[in-house]
Amino acid sequence: MATEYLGDRVRRLRRMADLTQEGLAERSGASIDTIRRLEQKPQSSVTLPTMHALAAGLGVELTSLLGDPPGAPSTGESDSPQMVAVRRAIMPPLFAPPAPPGDLETLSLERIRGQVAGGWTLYHAAEFDKLLYVLPGLITDARFAASVGDTDQRAAGQAVLGKALQLGGHLAIRMGKTDLALAALERAIAAADASSDPLLAPMISNSVAWAYQRQARLDDARYLAVHAADGVEKEYSSTSEGLRVWGGLLMSAATSHARSGDYERANDMMVTAEKAAGRLAKMPTPQDGKLLSVFSKSSVRIERVRLAVQHERPTEALALARGMRLSKDTPPSWRTWLLLDVARAHTDLGDAEGAVKALESLKRHAPAWMRHHTLAVAIVTDLWNGPSRPAGLRALAEFLGVAS
């Protein structure tokens, strides 16, 4: 498959939105000449504020316009062997015997549950290449656990299978394969319905809502998140597990509102979620925290920073980020997003020095993630082409291959 440059992606997303070049210019505020130049010369670049405007006009996340960090190197026109193995695990071939599980002598539900939790740790650390290798075996072992034993054992196995398939859905989204993600998540919800965990299906619904958002199906995403949140709130919000699942769904609904242009309503929902997260400190810690929602005061504040940046409120974003104390269970991927959004906010305000400090911290915490993330490259490129080059910028530009 040929490389898709920025201009190619703008043209594709514009046509998907049924917009003319003039229509996109009107909706985004970007000039018609800029849009024409991008589409005629796809390798051209634009400034970060223009990228924000184009993303808003197209109704997509900025990462959809720039592209997510690659999870694993591409091998050309077809999927890599690892991705094919993930597909086969999620959707076993028709009329073929089931794949054999791992070592039956050491295979146990507790061991599989621990391995799935380890898979989620790899995911949150953005170790997508490693996860591609281990995920097929995780799903195969979990599917086996869901088919053996008595009724209670099979139900417990279905819960583990649901989490393994949900992990497959998340990885597929990160790989830009939302159709595969939805196939995995549909199977995950079916497993959840057959399990003994009443919170698992709404938890996976949050993942489905995220997949819908990536497809710009914002109404579908919002309806699903609100519907699932209402069900959890009535029955389970008095427990830490239920509150975390409910809070994650509320954040998802807020994000859909924000991407639809209703920032004020989204922010009100985020404030409600943050207040609810404060109750978690007084509740018992869940036993399987890695297999639950990442909802916490830290995650809500990180998402509020992101929404403020995306809606061109950099001063508000920096005020929200100032003095944040991240909880110990905040995944590394969320920490890196926060630093990147802080750098974006400083860039939008013309504070190159503040942006460089945030990017230097990002490089220390997640150098591999930063090197491959197109948004990090875009910010450094914007700074490099700016009026001033503060100390530290050259090292970042050379690290990302921006400096000529």
Image: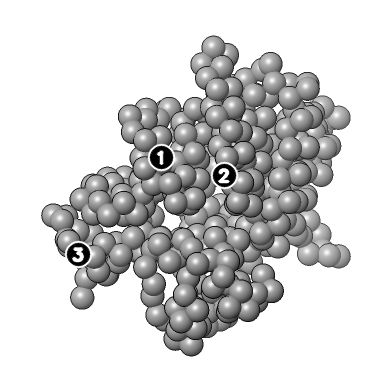
Q: Amino acid at mark 1?
A: Glu
In the image, residue 301 lies at what x, y percent? Answer: 47, 34
**Which residue is identified by label 2?**
263
Decide if residue 261 is on the left or right side of residue 197. left
Q: Amino acid at mark 2?
A: Tyr
Which residue is at a point 43% across and 27% down the rendered structure image? Answer: 327
Near-viewer residue (205 or 194): 205
In percent of width and height, residue 286 lies at 59, 21
Task: Tell me if residue 357 comes above or below residue 300 in the rendering.
Answer: below
Q: Quadrant of residue 248?
A: top right
Q: Amino acid at mark 3?
A: Pro
Which residue is drawn at the image coordinates 67% and 30% (left, top)? Answer: 246
Disc number at residue 193? none
Distance, label 1 to label 2, CA atoms, is: 13 Å
Q: Nearer the viewer, residue 285 or 75?
A: 285
Disc number placed over residue 316 in the picture, else none: 1
Question: What residue is drawn where x is 35% and y is 46%?
Answer: 342
